[in-house]
Amino acid sequence: GEIFGFYVIAKQYFNRYRLPVMHTETNIWEPNAVHWLKKQWANLYRLKKDGVPVVGFTWYSLIDQVDWDTA
């Protein structure tokens, strides 16, 4: 299903290049942020469980922020 979209691409990447994976800069606006985070975490958890070396996960940004040009 759609919850494992990142999993499929990251697994293909690992199978091809045999390099570690780090999931970075992912976020979505409220009210879907918690659901999105759970989906991203599920993908990384499954990758790690399947033997892919996961070296990091960044929830960007942990708190909401304004654009760089609007301060």
Image: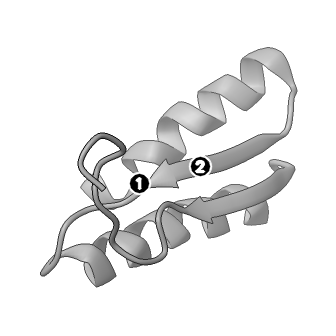
50 left or right, relative to 28: right
Instruction: Classify residue 32 by image quadrant.
Output: bottom left
User: Residue 25: x and y, percent?
Assistant: 51, 49
Q: Position of residue 41 (x, y in %)?
A: 53, 71
| Residue under pointer 1 | 4
Question: Which type of secondary structure does the marked residue at label 1 adopt?
Answer: helix
- Measured along the vertical axis of the image, is residue 30 above or below residue 12? below
Mark 1: which amino acid? Phe
Query: Which of the labelled discs sits on residue 71, or is there none?
Result: none
> Which residue occupies the foreground of this view, 65 or 5?
65
Residue 20: x %, y % from top left: 85, 39
Can residue 6 be seen here? yes
Residue pointed to by mark 2 = 24
Nearer the viewer's eye, disc 2 or disc 1?
2
Q: Residue furthest top?
A: 16
Q: Residue at x 49, y 60 (%)?
A: 60
Whether 61 is drawn above or below 33: the answer is: above
Quarter holding the N terminus? bottom left
Outermost residue, front direction?
71
Amino acid on which disc 2 is placed: Thr
| Residue located at (81% from left, 17% from top) | 17
Residue found 36% across the figure and 44% down from its top:
68
Q: Which quadrant is home to the C terminus? A: bottom left
In the image, residue 43 sits, relative to residue 31, either above or below, namely above
